Image (tube, rainbow, N blue to C red):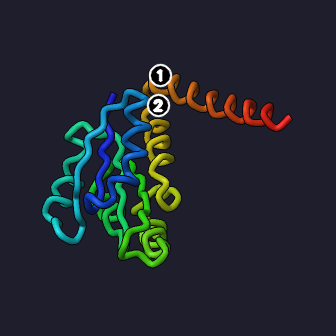
Amino acid sequence: MGKVGVIMGSKSDLPVMQDAIDILKGFDIEVEVDIVSAHRTPEKLFDYGKHAHTNGFKVIIAGAGGAAHLPGMIASLSPLPVIGVPVKSSNSIDGWDSVLSILQMPGGVPVATVALNGAKNAGILAAQIIGSHDSCVLDKVVAYKEGLKLKVHESAKDLK
């Protein structure tokens, strides 16, 4: 099984990105977390992006707020799937700047983009990607989704 890199532009993004970390750990997927700022540590960003696939990563989840260049820049450097998490940060314009910065990538540089502050879904998507080649992870994703269905049925019973 490969590991998932969870990176963010600053430590202030961690409360949002923690949802992805928790989901991945719940699926017993190895997670490596780091701060990689597109604007403040460009050398680190280039090194991370160029070498992620040779460092055992299978998927990268990149969260960023404001101008949110991190996911797109990582995607431009790495052959791995990149999942972008737009983060509504203190310097953000209602989060739309982050959403559009990650969503509107040019042809040839895809970034799978989840909802604003949607790190939980990023973690699930990363698990599904890994599960497409790892039957143990796939079984855990299937069980997770079954659990979601059961929760809905239980909630419906409470209404009656």
* Secondary element type, mark 2: helix
Label 2: few (<14), some or many (≥20) within 10 Å? Answer: some
Q: Is label 2 in contact with label 1 (beta carbons under 8 Å)?
A: yes
Numbered badge on residue 117:
none
Q: Position of residue 15 (x, y in %)?
A: 37, 53
Quarter the C terminus occupies: top right
* Secondary element type, mark 1: helix
In which quarter of the view is residue 30 placed? top left
Outermost bottom residue: 93
**Residue situated in front as seen by the camera: 39 or 2:** 39
The residue under the point 45% across, 26% down is 137
Say whether residue 142 is left or right of residue 36.
right
Note whether 54 is above or below 30 in the view shown.
below
Question: What type is the residue that disc 1 sits on?
Answer: Ser
The residue under the point 45% across, 75% down is 97
In which quarter of the view is residue 157 placed? top right
What residue would you read off at disc 1?
A: 135
Numbered badge on residue 131:
2
Note whether 63 is above or below 153 in the view shown.
below
Note whether 35 is above or below 102 in the view shown.
above
